[in-house]
Image: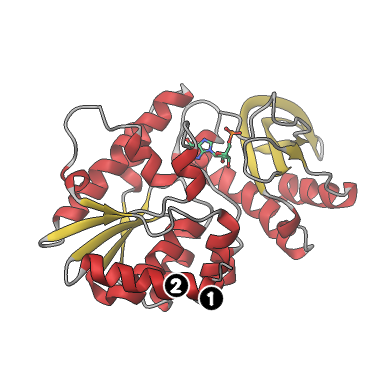
Amino acid sequence: DWTSEQFIDATVAELQEQIGDDKVVLGLSGGVDSSVAAMLIHQAIGKNLYCIFVDNGLLRKDEFETVLDSYKHMGLNVKGVDAKAKFYEALAGLTDPEQKRKAIGRVFIEVFDDEAHQIEDVKWLAQGTIYPDVIESVSVKGPSATIKSHHNVGGLPDFMKLKVVEPLKTLFKDEVRLVGKTLNIDETIIGRHPFPGPGLAIRILGDITPEKVSVLQQVDHIFISNLKKSGLYDEVWQAGAILTPVQSVGVMGDERTYENVVALRAVTSIDGMTADWSRLPYEFLADVSNEIINKVKGVNRVVYDISSKPPATIEWE
Ligand code: XMP
């Protein structure tokens, strides 16, 4: 029978054998997979694991700082890289979802490559690839997929010529979570909803500006923290908010307002391939809607997405 303890013992021993005294670079995303991969490799080789966590300016509110802090507490050798400006610059004026994804992937590779170059004599690239990523033909996960889908654009960045180590590639998500628990990784990381690599950029329909990101971060934060407060977070597979380019009329006191509509999306799912909209309680939705409209400047209407996948996707872009 599979146990996380056995898996960890065997994998740590294999990693030590395989890597020896070499240096390894790994891109952390804040998600479960890259975090568990990092902690496993850290157990095996300690400070020879160099982690890079990039702030692309498209993360949730305060996420970069909070997650970077927990990584440091976990003892990881991690460098936080503020690359917000580079991402915003590359995204300026882009409205097509695939172009936005490509721009984000390209900048991520540039930033990661620059950072990897600063690690002298690094030999390995570690990735948090899990079994479903290996079998899924259309991979949608994190930096590794971003990297894969850009394989054939121009020459390979240097870090991609490194030897690859993927300690989780035989595991399913629930097994990754068990391994993470056994490794004492923070529950806020282990229990985290999936979050797309391009982040809030694919939840802001149309072009991206730092102002729109800030509006969406506030909305998303109200939604997610209320889910946590009311004990609903773990019942939902993924949740988030979408900033639409639609403006609608509202009233505020005696004033007529004309501001943006945001949509809330929460789904239940096993693997993200199919999904159903979460039957969140009306009272909960009412409270979240009121709080968003009262607190977030620029938003005067909230709608709830009641589409299942298929035919709708989870993300709007
Ligand atoms: P869809 O919208 O296709 O999403 O139903 C299924 C799952 O994949 C995530 N997703 C992405 N993840 N890069 C990612 O890393 C992407 O470009 C991307 N697009 C969608 C989505 O958040 C959901 O978990």
Image point (44%, 25%), residue name: 98
The answer as to whether callout 1 falls within 8 Å of ligand 1 is no
- List x then y, in percent, for residue 122: 15, 60
* Residue at mark 2: 8
Extreme residue in the front direction: 1
Instruction: Look at the numbered disc 1 and give the secondary structure of its residue.
Output: helix
Q: Quadrant of residue 168?
A: bottom left
Per the image, label 2 sits on a secondary structure element best described as helix
Instruction: Please state which amino acid type lies under the numbered disc 1.
Output: Thr
- The x and y percentages for residue 270 are 67, 46
Q: What residue did someone put label 1 on?
A: 182
Q: Residue at horizontal 67%, vertical 54%?
A: 224
- Using residue 183 as the reference point, say whether residue 259 is left or right of it: right
As rendered, which of 127 and 265 lies closer to the eye? Answer: 127
Please, is residue 310 above or below residue 161 in the view? Answer: above
Mark positioned earlier in the residue sequence (1 or 2): 2
Identify the amino acid type marked 2: Ile
Counting from the top left corner in percent of width and height, residue 29 is at 42, 54
User: Which quarter of the picture shows residue 42?
Assistant: bottom left
For the residue pair 204 and 256, the one nearer the viewer reads as 204
Which quadrant of the rendered structure holds the N terminus?
A: bottom right
Q: Which residue lies at the image location 52% right of the left edge and 34% below the top edge?
A: 202
Disc 1, disc 2: CB below 8 Å?
yes
- Provide residue 226's location: percent of width, then percent of height: 73, 58
**Count the marks: how many?**
2
Instruction: Between label 1 and label 2, give the one nearer the viewer.
Output: 2
Q: Give above or below for 54 relative to 49.
A: above
In the picture, the disc for residue 200 is none
Residue drawn at (75%, 51%), measured in percent from left and top? 291
| Vertical placement of residue 164 versus 304, above or below | below
